[in-house]
Image: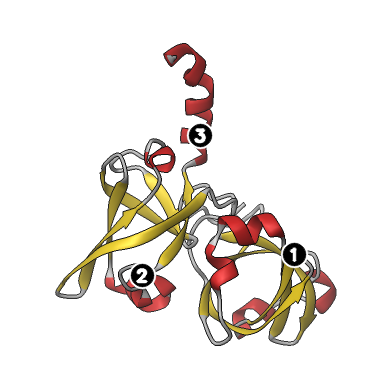
């Protein structure tokens, strides 16, 4: 489980085809090495742009992950290029501080940046999403965008808006996004269960 509080940015070192999957090699920051031996890193879960992947190899600050067909089809990881920056968050420890919201690292789909309205140091971002995802969002609720926990300001049937503070713009990939860019979307897991339970009754 994650909380949507990005710890650092990583850099894509290489992308290698492995059948219908890809091996993703990422240079991670020194903070990821603190207090952990290589054996502890192997098998660990790391959210990359909000997508939970497993560390399959670790050589100092260079870690490798494998992304399967489903991951490549349902997220923006399949469009990454060498040199791209990615948001990184390690799985939350049992004694960790819960700072964002419940993020599983299971991306529900991809949205697109529809509009950016900059005002002073802040910015309002509007994203277009499928109706099925928008239906699981409520104003003042939570959403994870490329793994970043954010509060929903406005929601329509096919879009939503969030406000990004200067810190978020500076320390995550969202500050580098442009209109038309694809982003990973994970809706609130509580909304999914409520929709599942109430769906038959509503029908």
Q: Is 42 on the left or on the right of 108, as rendered?
A: right
Q: How far apart are marks 3 and 2 (CA)?
A: 26 Å
Instruction: Answer whether residue 56 is visible to the viewer in this image.
Output: yes
165 vs 160, nearest the viewer: 160
Tell how many labels. 3
Q: Position of residue 31 (x, y in %)?
A: 60, 80
100 vs 156, nearest the viewer: 156
Q: Residue at x 37, y 41 (%)?
A: 134
Q: Is residue 95 above or below residue 49?
A: above
- Looking at the rendered image, the quarter that the C terminus falls into is top left
Sequence-wise, which precedes: disc 3 or disc 1?
1
What residue is pinned by disc 2? 168
What residue is pinned by disc 1? 20
Q: Which residue is drawn at 36% across and 70% down?
A: 168
What residue is pinned by disc 3? 192
Q: Residue at x 48, y 27 (%)?
A: 195
Sequence-wise, which precedes: disc 3 or disc 2?
2
Quadrant position of residue 115: bottom left
Q: Is 108 on the left or on the right of 68, as rendered?
A: left
Q: Distance between the residues labelled 1 and 2?
A: 34 Å
């Amino acid at each position: 489980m994650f909380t949507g509080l990005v710890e650092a940015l990583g850099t894509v070192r290489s992308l290698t085809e492995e059948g219908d999957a890809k091996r993703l090699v990422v240079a991670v920051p020194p903070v990821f090495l603190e207090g952990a031996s290589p054996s502890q890193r192997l098998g660990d879960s790391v959210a990359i742009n909000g997508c939970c992947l497993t560390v399959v190899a670790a050589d100092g600050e260079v870690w490798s992950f494998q992304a399967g067909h489903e991951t490549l089809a349902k997220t923006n990881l399949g469009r990454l290029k060498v040199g791209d920056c990615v948001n990184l968050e390690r799985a939350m420890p049992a004694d960790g501080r819960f700072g964002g919201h419940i993020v599983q690292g299971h991306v529900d789909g991809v949205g697109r940046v529809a509009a950016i309205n900059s005002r002073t140091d802040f910015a309002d971002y509007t994203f277009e999403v499928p109706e099925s995802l928008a239906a699981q969002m409520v104003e003042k609720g939570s959403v994870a965008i490329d793994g970043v926990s954010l509060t929903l300001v406005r929601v329509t049937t096919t879009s939503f808006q969030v406000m990004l503070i200067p810190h978020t713009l500076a320390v995550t990939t969202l500050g580098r996004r442009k209109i038309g860019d694809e982003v990973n979307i994970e809706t609130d897991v509580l909304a999914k269960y409520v929709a599942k339970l109430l769906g038959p009754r509503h029908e």
